[in-house]
Image (spheres, rainbow, N blue to C red):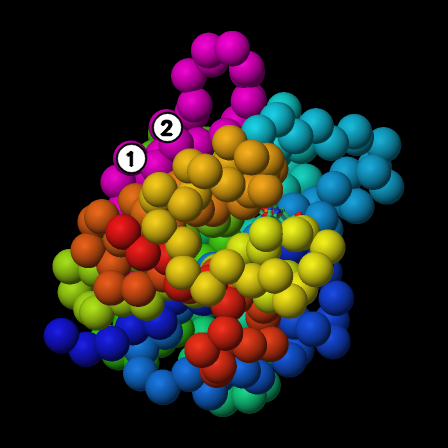
């Protein structure tokens, strides 16, 4: 099987033009097949605020009402995705921006209301890996936005870490996949404020321990749950690292 690297970029990196430009340049230098997944939660929160729409997050997920869905569609499917595609084209990468609706590559269902009503948030149900693999085989580099659809005409907001995990799992049937979660910290840390406290190897047992101690919390929990799930589903390697370190062996290596 051929190698494929799937990079997810989120957090502050997407919001800051200089760090995004650097990431795109580093990404372009990855050898072999590649896919980029982007977030943009902070940009969506900023635009929503300008429009007088308050952002509410529960368990790292955005409560997405009708107006918020319009904002995230504009920001993720429009501004952020197209800026990244244009940035990659400028450095010779044949990028193609996609939401889950494009070529119906990722279908989801609106999350059922239990304790929390997340609104227009999608749980992924089906990934069309053949469509992605076909594009990738033709030399196209998919740039995946955190939007899916229900195939009944509705777009749904889906966390970018989940898009990355689901796409990686689906592509594991076609490629030897490495999943890299990039953000602004050096990896999973034992002290969130100390970039030198990187946990170099993280197993499910250590994860449970650190969650119980409060060392790992917030948005890092779903990121790691997605990581273990991806490894269990045949993804070859998962790394959580700082965006400027993707060509080093730094960061946190996730293990089973
Ligand atoms: N042990 C930890 N090490 C690093 N970050 C952690 C840790 N525990 C919680 N976090 C938080 O998780 C955040 C990353 O999750 P999230 O914001 O969902 O991802 P992203 O920045 O990729 O969108 C970090 O910015 C940090 O605040
Ligand atoms: C349902 C849900 O929470 N969707 C996320 C999608 C964007 C995202 O994940 O962006 P980052 O990777 O930059 O955090 C949101 O709207 O914030």
> Residue 54 or 181: which is nearer the viewer?
181
Residue that appears at 48% across and 81% down: 248
Numbered disc 1: secondary structure: strand
Residue that appears at 67% across and 64% down: 195
Residue 61 x/y as whole percent = 57, 33
Quadrant where the N terminus is found in the figure? bottom left
Residue 13 x/y as whole percent = 67, 64
Residue 208 appears in view:
yes
Label drawn at residue 84: none
> Residue 253 or 55: which is nearer the viewer?
253
Q: In the rendered structure, are the residues bearing label 1 and label 2 in contact, judged by CB atoms less than 8 Å apart?
A: yes
Label drawn at residue 109: 2
Alpha-carbon neighbours of circle 1 within 10 Å: few (<14), some, or many (≥20)? few
Numbered disc 2: secondary structure: strand
Establish if 94 lies above or below 223.
below
Magenta stretch holds residue 72: no
Magenta stretch holds residue 114: yes
Label drawn at residue 125: 1
Alpha-carbon neighbours of circle 2 within 10 Å: few (<14), some, or many (≥20)? many
Residue 21 x/y as whole percent = 66, 78
The answer to whether residue 3 is left or right of residue 1 is right
The answer to whether residue 219 is left or right of residue 229 is right
State the count of labels.
2
Tell me which segment is drawn in magenta.
Answer: 105-133
Picture quarter containing residue 125?
top left
């Amino acid at each position: 099987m051929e190698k494929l690297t799937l990079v997810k970029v989120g957090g502050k990196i997407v919001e800051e033009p200089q760090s995004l430009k650097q990431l795109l340049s580093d990404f372009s230098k990855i050898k072999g097949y590649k896919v980029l997944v982007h977030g943009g939660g902070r940009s969506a929160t900023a635009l929503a605020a300008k429009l007088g729409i308050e952002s509410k997050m529960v368990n790292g997920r955005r409560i997405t009402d009708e107006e918020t869905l319009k904002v995230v569609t504009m920001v993720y499917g429009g501004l952020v995705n197209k800026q990244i595609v244009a940035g990659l084209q400028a450095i010779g990468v044949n990028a193609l921006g996609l939401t889950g609706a494009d070529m119906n590559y990722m279908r989801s269902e609106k999350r059922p209301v239990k304790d929390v009503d997340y609104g227009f948030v999608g749980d992924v149900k089906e990934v069309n890996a053949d469509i992605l693999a076909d594009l990738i085989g033709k030399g196209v580099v998919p740039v995946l936005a955190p939007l899916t659809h229900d195939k009944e005409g509705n777009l749904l907001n889906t966390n970018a870490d989940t898009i990355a995990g689901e796409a990686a799992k689906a592509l594991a049937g076609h490629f030897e996949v490495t999943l890299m979660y990039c953000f602004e910290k050096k990896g999973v840390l034992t002290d969130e404020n100390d970039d030198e406290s990187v946990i170099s190897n993280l197993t499910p047992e250590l994860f449970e321990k650190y969650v119980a101690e409060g060392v790992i919390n917030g948005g890092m929990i779903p990121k790691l749950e997605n990581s273990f799930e991806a490894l269990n589903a045949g993804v070859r390697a998962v790394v959580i690292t700082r965006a400027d370190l993707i060509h080093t062996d730094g960061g946190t290596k996730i293990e089973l």
